[in-house]
Image (spheres, rainbow, N blue to C red):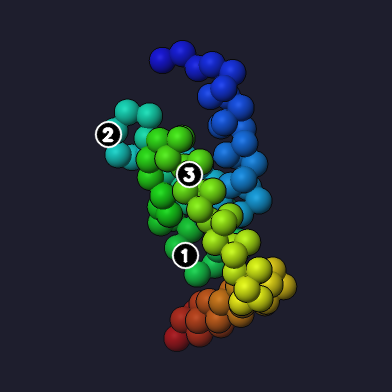
Amino acid sequence: MSIGTRELMLIRRVEEELDRLGMRMAVSYNNRDNSISVYPKDENHLPCFNHQMSLFEGTIEELAMFLHGVDWARRYDLALGLKTDQRRERSEQKVRNRKLLDMIGESNE
């Protein structure tokens, strides 16, 4: 399969958006052609999710639409005043702290 300039620009734009949202792209384990998966970057990003769990699977075009929807939902929440980035970060830190305390508790047993 050859890749053109349009596809290359789309891939780069998607990679930048994934990085901004704390996600990473990987080759899908599914046998579909041109299928990719998206995961949280690591344990510190998107702490509510298992960092080994796939958040999305599909083609690069489907991923671009998925990311557009995620971005729209975040902007809509901000417009309604439901969440702010600071509140989201505080909530994520609480989840990280709870996981750390659970891990410490398990190691003491």
- Report the Cα–Cα distance between label 1 and label 3: 21 Å
Within-10-Å neighbours for mark 2: few <14, some 14–19, many 20+: few
Instruction: Please give left or right for residue 105 compared with residue 83 in the image.
Output: left
Q: In this view, does 34 lie to the left or right of 71?
A: left
- At horizontal 53% and vertical 56% (from top left) the residue drawn is 70
**Horizontal relation, residue 64 to residue 82: left or right:** left
- Write down the residue under mark 2: 31
Q: Is mark 3 on a helix, strand or loop?
A: helix
Q: Which mark lies nearer to you, 1 or 3? A: 3
| Residue 79 visible | yes
- At x 56%, y 32%, the residue is 11
Q: Position of residue 14 (x, y in %)?
A: 57, 39
Residue 61 spot, x, y in % from top left: 45, 35
For the residue marked with disc 1, what is the amino acid?
Phe
Mark 1 vs 2, N-terminal side: 2
Mark 1 crowdedness (10 Å alpha carbons): few <14, some 14-19, many ≥20: some
Mark 1 lies on residue: 49
Depth-wise, is mark 3 or mark 2 nearer the camera? 3
Q: Is residue 57 left or right of residue 83?
A: left
Q: In this view, does 65 lie above or below 98?
A: above
Q: Which mark is residue 65?
A: 3
Q: How far apart are marks 3 and 2 (CA)?
A: 21 Å
The three-letter code of the residue at mark 2 reads: Asn
Q: Which percent across, then down, holds residue 30?
A: 30, 39
The image shows residue 34 at horizontal and vertical percentages of 38, 29
